[in-house]
Every structure is written in structure tokens, then in C-alpha cells.
Amino acid sequence: MSSLIALLLVCFSAVAVTPAAFADTIVVAFSDPVLSGMVENSPKAGQETFVDNTRTAAYGIRNSMAGSLLLWGTSELSEPYQAFSELLIVGNTIPADTSAPFELATLTYTNGSSANDTEIFGATVSFYDNVISASTYLGSDQLMITNTGNVFGRPGDLARGDDDYIAICGNKSNLCATPIAAVESSEGGTSVTVDLFGTLSTVPAPTPEPGSFSLMLTGGLAGAWVWKCRRSV
């Protein structure tokens, strides 16, 4: 097991009807899974194959105030390997001062040993203040999932191993350039946990309306990337 300290910045703009309140909780929700994309290192190292899993993808979404879960993929591999991948995001409390970086949420990524035709390639990640509703919406970004063919038979990056990656991408985001890798279950992985930090500040709305304003959420992944997975870098 190894650990890595990282600070990554991500920004996105959003519109809310009411201001984010002190001591409220950031609630995260998944939606709109992406069912087609490129599989890296397939059919061999250095190549990629386009896969349309519209009819074959296996996924599940469980959104709640206590934490939201995205599951994807299946495999014929038996225990002790985990067949499906999962991403759990648990929101944290909004502090009194949102202009200073604070912990928005905690992400836990587990990389299963899924078949390529059952995987997804991303989803929308939306942030809310305390409850999931139009009036508490803070903003959203795109979760990007990089799936790889297991041609190396060992953990490692795209050039040397079979790790899969996730990234949070969007307007003004640079998290795309520094994705989170996890070792898959069949190669020794269990989970990778990171903390999402950011700031929340008001900015002028383009078309002001009574009681409404726009927010900018700037975030970063900071903390120990705990390589408890069978896929790590």
C-alpha cells in the first residue's frame, strides 16, 4: 500500500435560488450515464477500441443525502474478486466561511474486474445544498471514466499496466489533466479514497432576478490517495 498527497483544482459555475447556508450539507447526485466510449489498450497495448454499450452496459445509481453511489460493470470472475466498479461520494458540511477552501465531499473509488461490454464511460455529477431540488442546485461537472483492456496483467499506468481512471471535468476544470487511478480487484485493488476541497462564492448573475444569484464552486482533490485497490499508480 502506498499514499500520495495531491492538490488539484476544479471550477464550475452554477445558479441557485437561495444562498448556501452555514451548517447545511453538500449533497451530490449522479445522473445521465455515458454508455459508449473508447477502451484504452484494446485490443493490444497502445491501441484503443470504440465500444457502444447502449444495450449491454450494467449500471446502477443510488442518490441520497447520506451519500450517492454509482455502480457499473459485471464480470464472470468469481470471488474474491469484485466484478463491478463503484464510486461513492459523501457530501460534507458547509462552513460559515465558504471563501476559504473547505472539504466539499469524500470520494471512494473501487475498480472492479468488469467485462468491457458492461462498462460505462462517465456520468453527470451534480451538487446541491442540503436536499436535491431545483432550488438548491449549486452546479455540476462531468465524471469521466477511462476503461482499459487488461493486456499487461499487472497494476500500472496506461503505458505499463491495467489501471482504470476517473476524472471530474467541466468548465474551468483542470482535474481532467490529473485523473485518479485505481488498481482493479483481480490485480490486488480494494479502494481509493480522496477528499474534494473547494470554495463557494457569489458572482454576478448574467440576468439578475429577485432572490437569485449565481455561484462559482472551486474545488480540489486533496488528501491521501489511499491505494487500497488492486489498481494503483
Image (spheres, rainbow, N blue to C red):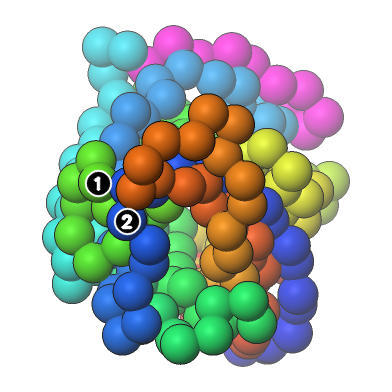
The residue identified by callout 2 is 18
**Residue 12 inside the magenta-drawn segment:** no
Residue 50: x and y in percent read 59, 13
Q: Residues within 10 Å of mark 2 (few under 14, many from 20)?
A: some
**From which residue to which does the magenta span run?**
43-53
Q: Amino acid at mark 1?
A: Ser
Q: Are marks 1 and 2 in contact (CB under 8 Å)?
A: yes
Q: Residue furthest front?
A: 210
In front: 71, or 82?
71
Q: Amino acid at mark 2?
A: Thr
The residue identified by callout 1 is 135
What residue appears at the point 62 percent right and 46 percent down from the top-left corner?
204
Of the residues under marks 1 and 2, which one precedes in the sequence?
A: 2
- Distance from disc 1 to disc 2, alpha carbons, whole Å, reads 7 Å
What residue appears at the point 70 percent right and 32 percent down from the top-left corner?
41
Q: Is 60 left, or right, of 213 in this rendering?
A: left
What residue appears at the point 63 percent right and 76 percent down from the top-left corner?
99
Tell me the quarter of the image containing the C terminus: bottom right
Residue 177: x and y in percent read 80, 48
Task: For mark 1, give the secondary structure.
Answer: helix
The image quadrant of residue 90 is: bottom left
Q: Is residue 140 visible?
A: no
Identify whether 143 is placed above or below 57: below
Q: Please tell me whether mark 1 or mark 2 is closer to you in this view.
A: 2
**Residue 47 inside the magenta-drawn segment:** yes
Residue 125: x and y in percent read 41, 45
